[in-house]
Amino acid sequence: MKEFEMSTAKIAISLDQQYLNRLDYFIERKIFKNRSQAIQFAIIEELKRLEQSRLAIECAKLDPNFEKNGWLYLLYT
């Protein structure tokens, strides 16, 4: 996983036992090497998802008619 080959900072988190058990399930099955790697992966994936959602929300605000024709008007005024 290349995304984990970056400088890292150590942090402490609190996590409900039920989620920790679920996390450990994936570690026991060798999907992740350790809790740190699993949590890093989850955070990176959620950040990507949030950024993609934000982009989709901003794109939905655009006026399709302006996007098709408006830029020509602006270009030649």
Image (cartoon, grey):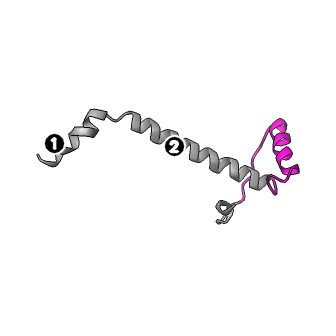
- Residue 52: give its label: 2
Who comes first in sequence, dot 2 or dot 1? 2
- Residue 42 picture location, percent across and down: 69, 47
Give the residue at mark 1. 73
Q: Amino acid at mark 1?
A: Tyr
Quarter of the rendering containing residue 2: bottom right
Asked whether, in this view, residue 51 is left or right of residue 34, the answer is left
Asked whether, in this view, residue 43 is left or right of residue 76, the answer is right
Q: Residue at x 86, y 41 (%)?
A: 21
- Give the farthest residue toward the front: 68
Asked if labels 1 and 2 touch by Cβ distance under 8 angstroms, the answer is no
Label 1 crowding class (10 Å Cα cut-off): few <14, some 14-19, many 20+?
few
- Residue 49 picture location, percent across and down: 57, 43
Quarter of the rendering containing residue 65: top left
Q: Residue at x 75, y 55 (%)?
A: 37
Task: Provide the secondary structure element on which disc 2 rests.
Answer: helix
- Give the farthest residue toward the right: 28
Query: For residue 20: magenta?
Result: yes
Q: Amino acid at mark 2?
A: Gln
Q: Residue at x 77, y 43 (%)?
A: 14
The N terminus lies in quadrant: bottom right
- Residue 3 picture location, percent across and down: 64, 60
Q: Nearer the viewer, residue 68 or 18?
A: 68
